[in-house]
Every structure is written in structure tokens, then in C-alpha cells.
Image: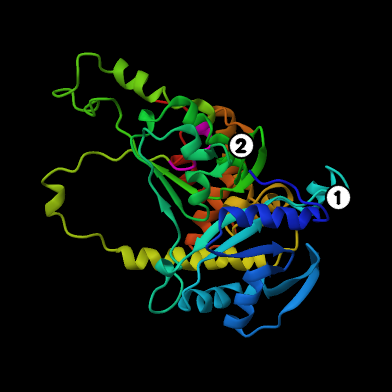
């Protein structure tokens, strides 16, 4: 366990504590718009990157070597360091400076390593740019999924940040584990609290889950279903709580594939064509975010799922017939406020996929078809 040393600033004490966990890696320490490096890390990085080596204060009577790289250009510097055989731990700010000030004038912004870049992440063209994909087994514990342990380490929801978290056999996960997903799905962050640590990690992920209708899997086939059908299906699906279901935007029931299905001609629109439409829709959303200057978008991915409050109202404005359909559906389906807003975001995305500026009644109707308000 690290101990405080005299004449060490709170910021430098934090740097040294993080560095203890990554002694064999250069530590990129986020300070505003720059990643700063100190001590031997700074000396090594300045030589490898051919950048200026400066100093910042003193430690144990000697000047502290320092160098830094801009956040917006960090990938290029990372690529150079990895090609030269270095490992790099990227430490990010986990909260806004205003949050730190609430704890006292001398409080330091919480930081921790959210990414470890090694030669194994290097391809012929550069750093691997594919988004993370995590698929934990249904026996995963609560700390494994959301984070924890004695050092409050990040879990699968953070490791899937800006990528996909796939949960197969969803009802087989422990009920407490599933319920712990509610906060990160809603806020895009997860807070891990321990006696010696209180850390908030990023957790903007796309959750994709799969499940059978019942434990035996034959609920829809009377000739093969178990003797407890349909109650077995109701009990099995009831393992997923209403609040968690309310956070799932798209629910699709996929029937079993028959031998006849395998002989059918391929669909007119293939994966390549669909991918092009998705890319165009995401580009439209990114352009929409580029025009905003709201703090509400800070550290959020530029997609419709991040729209809320005033921005949600502005970009999800409905035509009169669409507004009438939403109002009717909200009353008949007893939509929660959360469900109502998620419905609008899905409709906005459907309109983007069709290259439509306005959300039409048809887009609302399609979004409603994906909504599931109760378990079967």
C-alpha cells in the first residue's frame, strides 16, 4: 500500500499512486487538453517522440521531468511509442473539475487508467480501431460485470465502453448482476464504491442480449414443450425485471429456422447495403452533434441515444399525426417517461436510416413495434 510522502502535491501523489499499478508502462496522465508524462516516463517519451522535455516542480529535492502531447493528436503519438516497443497506460479524468471542487478546494479530479495500449494492439496500418466486444459468461459475478475488488477495478461494462456488451442466456445471469446494469445503461457511467476507493468509470455500451422463451426452449412448439408450459415461460422470463426491460429499446422474437428457410433466395438488401445505410445515419447524427455546444453532450458518443432534455425536444420534434400516435400509445401502453423518451430516440434513428429530416408517423409506428411493455 502506498503512503503519502512529504512535500508531494495531491496531484503528484495521485500520479505516483496510479503509476505504481503500471510500473512497466508509460503513463499518459490526462490534464485538461493534454496527456502529461512525468519522471522517467517523460524522459523516455521525449526521446522517442522527439518532443520538448520540460520540468514541473520538485520531488525529493530534484526537478520533475515533464513532457506532454495534445489529446486530439494522441493516437499518432501512441502509434509511434508502440512501434518502438513501449507499453502505454492511458489515464483519463473520471469526473469534471467542478465535481472535485465540491469536495474541497485542494481536491484532485479523479483519474484512473481506462486503456492499456501494447504492441499486441498494433496492426500493419496502425492501432486497432475496432470497437470492443465483450461477452461474459452468465456465471459472471457482480464485480466482474460492473467493477469492484479491493482496488475498485473496472468491469465488463467499462471494458465494453463505446462497443458491444453481449449477454447470452440473459435470464441465467444472477438477478443482482442484471439489476446492477440499470445505472450504467441509463447514465453511461458506473460508480464503484469501496472502503478505500470511490471511482466512476465510463460505460457507454450497446447491450445486446439473447434468451430462450423458457428453460427448455420449446415454449412455442406444443409438440416439444415441457409439461409446465406456458407457466414455465412466464417464470423464466420474469427473472428480468420491469425496470431493466424498460431500458431495452428493441425487442425481437426470432422464430426457429426451418430447413425450408435455408433454401430461400437471399434478401434483396444484403449486409453491405445495410452497413452503408447505417454508416450514413451515424454520420448524420455526428454532424448533428457537431452543431451543438451544450455541456450535456460532454464525453458522450455522438449518437441519438445521447439526446436528452432540450436537445431531445429539438431533434425529435413530431408532426401532428405523429404526436397524436405517440400520445395514444403512451396512454394505452402505459409508457413510463423513460420509455417515452427512448421511443422518440428510436424513431429519430429510423428516420435517419431513411435519410429523413423529420420524424413521421410511420417512424413512430415502427419504433412502437420494437417496444415491449410487458413480459409474455
Residue under the point 21% across and 27% down? 218
Q: Which of 49 and 250 is in front in this view?
A: 49
Disc ID at residue 106: 1
Q: Which of marks 2 and 1 is in front?
A: 1
Q: Which residue lies furthest to the bottom in this view?
A: 50
Determine whether 174 is above or below 152 in the image. Answer: above
Lower sequence index among marks 2 and 1: 1
How packed mark 2 is, by other alpha carbons closer than 10 Å (few <14, some 14-19, many 20 or more), is few
Magenta span contains residue 249? yes
Instruction: Report how far apart the C-alphas of labels 2 and 1 lie in the structure.
Output: 38 Å
The residue wearing badge 2 is 338
Residue under the point 45% across and 76% down? 126
Residue under the point 64% across and 35% down? 193
| Range covered by the magenta-colored residues | 244-250
Please tell me whether mark 2 sits on a helix, a strand or a loop: helix
Magenta span contains residue 268? no
Amino acid at each position: 500500500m502506498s503512503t503519502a510522502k512529504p512535500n508531494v502535491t495531491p496531484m503528484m501523489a495521485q500520479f505516483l499512486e496510479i503509476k505504481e499499478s503500471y510500473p512497466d508502462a508509460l503513463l499518459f496522465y490526462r490534464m485538461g487538453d493534454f496527456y502529461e508524462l512525468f519522471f522517467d516516463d517523460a524522459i523516455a517519451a521525449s526521446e522517442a517522440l522527439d518532443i520538448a522535455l520540460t520540468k514541473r516542480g520538485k520531488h525529493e529535492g530534484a526537478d520533475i521531468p515533464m513532457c506532454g502531447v495534445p489529446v486530439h493528436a494522441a493516437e499518432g503519438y501512441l502509434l509511434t511509442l508502440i512501434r518502438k516497443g513501449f507499453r502505454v497506460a492511458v489515464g483519463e479524468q473520471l469526473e469534471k473539475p467542478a465535481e472535485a471542487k465540491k469536495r474541497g478546494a485542494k481536491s484532485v479530479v479523479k483519474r484512473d487508467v481506462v486503456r492499456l495500449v501494447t504492441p499486441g494492439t498494433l496492426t500493419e496500418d496502425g492501432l486497432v480501431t475496432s470497437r470492443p466486444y465483450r461477452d461474459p459468461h452468465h456465471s459472471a459475478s457482480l464485480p466482474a460485470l460492473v467493477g469492484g475488488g479491493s482496488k475498485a477495478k473496472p468491469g465488463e461494462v467499462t471494458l465494453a465502453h463505446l462497443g458491444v456488451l453481449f449477454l447470452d442466456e440473459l435470464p441465467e445471469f444472477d438477478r443482482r448482476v442484471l439489476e446492477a446494469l440499470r445505472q450504467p445503461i441509463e447514465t453511461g457511467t458506473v460508480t464503484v464504491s469501496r472502503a478505500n476507493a470511490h471511482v466512476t468509470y465510463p460505460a457507454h455500451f450497446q447491450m445486446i442480449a439473447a434468451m430462450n422463451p423458457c428453460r427448455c426452449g420449446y415454449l412455442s412448439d406444443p409438440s416439444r414443450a415441457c409439461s409446465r408450459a406456458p407457466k414455465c415461460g412466464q417464470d423464466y422470463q420474469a427473472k428480468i425485471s420491469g425496470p431493466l426491460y424498460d431500458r431495452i429499446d428493441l425487442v425481437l422474437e426470432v422464430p426457429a429456422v426451418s430447413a425450408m428457410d435455408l433454401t430461400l433466395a437471399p434478401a434483396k438488401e444484403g449486409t453491405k447495403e445495410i452497413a452503408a445505410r447505417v454508416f450514413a445515419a451515424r454520420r448524420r447524427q455526428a454532424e448533428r452533434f457537431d452543431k451543438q455546444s451544450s455541456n450535456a453532450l460532454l464525453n458522450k458518443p455522438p449518437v441519438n441515444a445521447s439526446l436528452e432534455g432540450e436537445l431531445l425536444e429539438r431533434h425529435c420534434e413530431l408532426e401532428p399525426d405523429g404526436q397524436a400516435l405517440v400520445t395514444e400509445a403512451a396512454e394505452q401502453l402505459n409508457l413510463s417517461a423513460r420509455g417515452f423518451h427512448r421511443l422518440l430516440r428510436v424513431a429519430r434513428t429510423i428516420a435517419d436510416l431513411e435519410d429523413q429530416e423529420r420524424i413521421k408517423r410511420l417512424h413512430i409506428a415502427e419504433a412502437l413495434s420494437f417496444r415491449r411493455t410487458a413480459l409474455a
